[in-house]
Image (cartoon, rainbow, N blue to C red):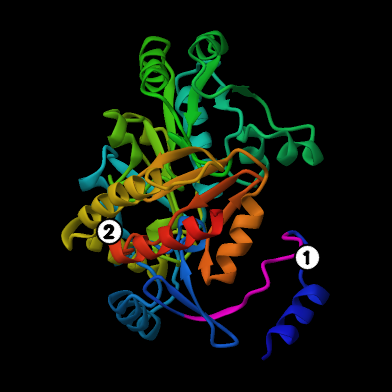
Amino acid sequence: MTFEEIKALDQKYYMNTFGERTPLCFVKGEGINLTDVNGETYKDFFAGIAVSSLGHGHPRMVRELKEQVENLLHVSNVYYIESQARLAQMLVENTCADRVFFANTGAEANEGAIKLAKKYFSNQGKEKYKIVTLKNSFHGRTLATVAATGQEKYQKPYRPLLEKFVHIEANDCAALENAVDDQTAAIMIELIQGESGVHPMNREFVDLAVRLCKERDMLLIVDEVQTGVGRTGKLFAYEQYGIEPDIFTMAKGLGGGVPIGAFGAKERVASAFVPGDHGTTFGGNPLSTRAGCVVMDELVNHGLLDHAAEAGTYFGRKLLELQSDKIAEIRGVGLMRGVEFKEEIAKDVAAAMMERHYLVGAVGTRVLRLVPPLVVTDEDIDTFIENLEEVLK
């Protein structure tokens, strides 16, 4: 099909939740390259919103998924699933979790984490149901995760929202202390807010959250949907802060492009779930967990995590060397970076980069979100920086 034929079908039959999409349709990928229906190739510094951790067309991923498709796509969680058990083992052995549960998306992972926190205190007969989250956060699009998300634009059409979520400003220690009380079950945070423009939490704020949870009998939930699976140069961003959450969630990069979500928890918390408390039809199926096993093995046992850390450090340094009076701030860690401009030019810059065949994300009107595949090379970064610098001139 031609691009115009595809666009016409989309506009006629698909619910208009994405508005006017970027006028590209891709049919093939290799490494950080994406090729569209017209045969034009683009350098991907967006990775499907931090999803394509191994890049596109990764030879091992292709080989193993082909094998899995030929053998078995789906059974049910009524039965044991080898790749599900293997991936659970890999996650537990390489994180602070003692147990994991697999879902299909980041929103489902966060929904499950919220349910687990509430069930944990319900089992103890405690009236603890409030969850403190941050303004400008993003936790998903289900009704519970929209309520957890601290952004009015996502919440307004769906009021009344599920209770009881309390939203405070990020990095505001006084507000955090004032927000918790005897009915607070958990503090739920992204250590780096992605959707609002790559805003890291400062160490003082994170340390306070940890201390309050210990002192006030609360759980710390860390949303690692975007920051996890090597994105920051560590397997999970909580390692950057030297903490261990009670529950943490993941998705995006875990499947390298195959939909999967998960949440992990300490044993004392995870044991709150008993048979019948939670479930899923598709979550943890043979295909998605096989993809997860490939990603985790490449990260942990084949040097990808070390490469991502080195590439992320290099990327950050090269961004800071950018010479432009249009830049207000450069933020982020590893291969998760935000470039904020002094003026509302982010969408224009993104469009100009697309004309040069580079794909980036624009957050609002002032911020570029840069989350390339973890396989990105220094050479890829150099040419990207050269093009961005020329665009800004």
* Viewer-nearest residue: 342 or 131: 342
The numbered mark, 2 or 1, whose residue comes first in the sequence reads 1
Where residue 148 appears, as percent x and y from the top left, is 61, 33
Q: What secondary structure do most residues of the magenta stretch adopt?
A: loop
Instruction: Identify the residue position indicated by label 1 in the image.
Output: 15
Q: Is residue 225 magenta?
A: no
Q: Is residue 77 visible?
A: no
Q: Residue at x 71, y 41 (%)?
A: 154
Q: Position of residue 29 (x, y in %)?
A: 44, 78
Q: Residue at x 79, y 32 (%)?
A: 160
Q: In the image, which disc is placed on residue 41?
A: none
Question: Gap in Å between the C-alphas at discs 2 and 1?
Answer: 35 Å
Of helix, strand and loop, which one carries label 1? loop
Would residue 193 be found to the left or right of residue 384 on screen? right
In the depicted structure, whether residue 26 falls above or below residue 178 = below
At a point 28% along the width and 76% down the height, the residue shown is: 60
Q: Label 1 crowding class (10 Å Cα cut-off): few <14, some 14-19, many 20+?
A: few
Query: Is 21 part of what is drawn in magenta?
Result: yes
Q: Which residue is mark 2?
A: 296
**Secondary structure type for disc 2:** helix
Q: Which residues are magenta?
A: 18-28
Q: Is residue 37 above or below residue 207?
A: below
